Amino acid sequence: MRLAAAASSYFGSVFAVGFILGIVRTIVLEPIVGALVSVIIEMPIILLASWFLANWVVQYFRIVSRRHALLVGLCAVFLLWLAELALALTMGATFDEWAHGLMIPPGLLGVAGQVVFAMLPVLVVTRRMLADEGSTREN
């Protein structure tokens, strides 16, 4: 139950940030610089937010193993994909249109960012394990 809550929290918080950034990207940036460049501009911002949120989730839900962190990340990215599909369908796109959007350069870059998003909890736990190992050696 704790891992499901962690995954839901991670997904929900990053989705909220991404939703706001996505609005800004599509309304403000895309008309000026195009779809690919706007995704390139947005990606570091959303990944930085994801890093902070992954740290919070790992600490708050006391995720200490890489296996559990991987489960959190995989479940969160699955929820993200479901939410993005639901949002696209709600806005009138078909499943095929949504899937096609993932196969063009801006979509492929977005998927790559989502893979990083899924792995961030593992990186956070690994970083903490290495820090704990280093502090144990010093003592």
Image: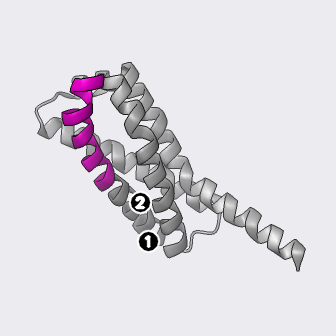
Tell me the quadrant of the picture where the C terminus can be found.
Answer: bottom right
Q: What SS does tag 1 mark?
A: loop
Q: Which residue is mark 2?
A: 10
**Which kind of residue does numbered mark 1 sit on?**
Met
Give the residues in magenta: 15-33
User: Residue 83 or 34: which is nearer the viewer?
Assistant: 34
Q: Could you say which quadrant of the image residue 9 lies in?
A: bottom left
Tell me if residue 37 comes above or below residue 54 in the rendering.
above
Lower position in the chain sequence, tag 1 or tag 2: 1
| Residue 24 lies in the magenta-colored region | yes
Q: Going by the image, does 17 lie left or right of 40?
A: left
The image shows residue 41 at horizontal and vertical percentages of 40, 35
How far apart marks 1 and 2 lie (CA) works out to 14 Å
Q: Is residue 7 above or below residue 86?
A: below
Q: Taking 70 as reference, is 37 above or below it?
A: above
Q: Residues within 10 Å of mark 1 (few under 14, many from 20)?
A: few
Q: What label does residue 1 carry, if any?
A: 1
